[in-house]
Image (cartoon, coloured by chain):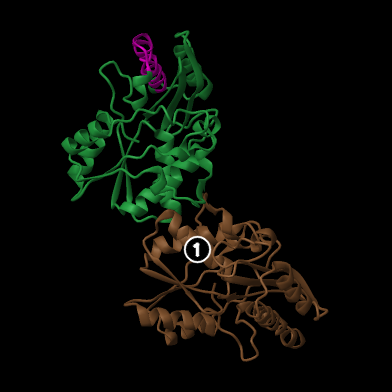
Chain colours: A brown, B green
Amino acid sequence: MGYLHDGHASLIRTARAESDLVITTIFVNPLQFAPNEDFTRYPRDLERDWRIAEEAGADVLFTPTPDEMYPSGFQTTISIGGVTTPFEGIFRPTHFDGVATVVAKLFLLTQPHKAFFGQKDYQQCMVVKKLVRDLAMPLEIVICPTKRENDGLAMSSRNVYLSAEERSKATILFKALERAQNLIQQGERKRRAIETLLQETLTSVREITIDYAAAADSETLEQADIFAETQDIVLLLAVRLGKTRLIDNLVVKT
Amino acid sequence: MGYLHDGHASLIRTARAESDLVITTIFVNPLQFAPNEDFTRYPRDLERDWRIAEEAGADVLFTPTPDEMYPSGFQTTISIGGVTTPFEGIFRPTHFDGVATVVAKLFLLTQPHKAFFGQKDYQQCMVVKKLVRDLAMPLEIVICPTKRENDGLAMSSRNVYLSAEERSKATILFKALERAQNLIQQGERKRRAIETLLQETLTSVREITIDYAAAADSETLEQADIFAETQDIVLLLAVRLGKTRLIDNLVVKT
């Protein structure tokens, strides 16, 4: 969606190292925003994006307009069940239809052998992998690690919305993830205990409202009451801080 | 969906004439049947299909099983609006989701430059063209004329369901289409007059129940009260004759 930061640049650098030709798509996709969301105010700076993408190694910058992607009479929706249902699916009910539809169309337009996605949008990564598997799209999805600021805040184009004070308080997300990771690594497998620690840590910042702070199976996103010893757990957070919605996650491998 | 007749063979022959390599897919797609429909009794004869496809010029016969197309956990649906809504969309409300989803997956699996569809499933042809256009699938859809028996009945795998008596009465569909075509060619542009002639002709056979017998714009399937002089009109029929559902259509060009 553009307004590139070093998280995006790292995706382009990884793609560059693994590919003959790198296409970067920049498209603020209206389909994945609900009417009450931040589509119109989403930050955009195509000149800066161009420079960052080129420096990171992109050969082609593909920047279609909404009218080019969705011309008059466009009427197709791709819906995926299962992994789309919890978490973001509850708070942004039409979001993943928009993601699946635009990603499928971008894949069909650019026809890549590999596509690189950031782990920061964890549930989106699972949705895109499901899309590709279910429809037998002929490409490989590569999930790349979340890039973080020095204090741990996950890089996000939406971080520019934060005031200086909010920016400083936003570090609580990564702290909560790390504390819950420690708890799991010490042997805790009860979901309620893990989630309570996440929630208590987050709400230590008065300005935060939690959409969800949850532990789930890292592949299926299913939420067992007690995780198996061998199960990889993903910790998933979405909070509102002032007018900004932030998400983050951490996978705890066993 | 297999149980090939000369309509299918003509698609393969056309593909053969226009292509280096011809793939014929045979898959009775459970997603496009409703629970009350004829999925289990739909006629199947893979050995005979193999011979017909080979004689018509197919290089590859692709015959996946439902489990291969829809493995456990398959959860993706492609829905198309607009052209899916009237006609078959009313009588088979989930049908075109199943068609769009399977056709997209078959296209992604086989990656053809061209795909050949029979005009007999007219609305399906429009849905597939919309799918390809909306998602920018990199292939061309070629619509091939409906093949008919000597007495005008459109070839269909479902014709084997008809008793000898029903088979003889089924010719009324093409007669109705021809009469309505004549009426339009004589200058009639009022939809009600065209549809009344279709319906009266069909119901002259007592055993027929009409699902729809309609005139519509040949591209958008919109049903104006009075068609423009320059508008190509498609006549669309779906009837039940005994336990068999039959469809047919005719495009009347201006």
Does residue B194 lie above or below B131 as drawn? above
Q: In what element is the residue under mark 1?
A: helix
Count up the numbered dots: 1
x and y, in percent, of residue A131 in the image: 48, 58
Mark 1 residue crowding within 10 angstroms, few (<14) / some (14–19) / many (20+): many
- State the image coordinates of residue A241 (x, y, percent, origin top left): 75, 76
Q: Which segment is the magenta one?
A: B162-184
Residue A210 in sight in this render: yes
Q: Which one is in front, B77 or B10?
A: B77
Q: Amino acid at mark 1?
A: Val
Q: Which residue is mark 1?
A: A128
| B174 inside magenta stretch | yes
Eyeballing the image, is A131 above or below B209? Answer: below
In this view, which residue lies farthest toward the right? A206
- Which quarter of the rendering shows the C terminus of chain B? top left
Q: x, y (%) of residue B160?
A: 34, 20
Residue B191 forms part of the magenta stretch? no
The N terminus of chain B, quarter of image: top left
Q: Main secondary structure of the magenta part?
A: helix
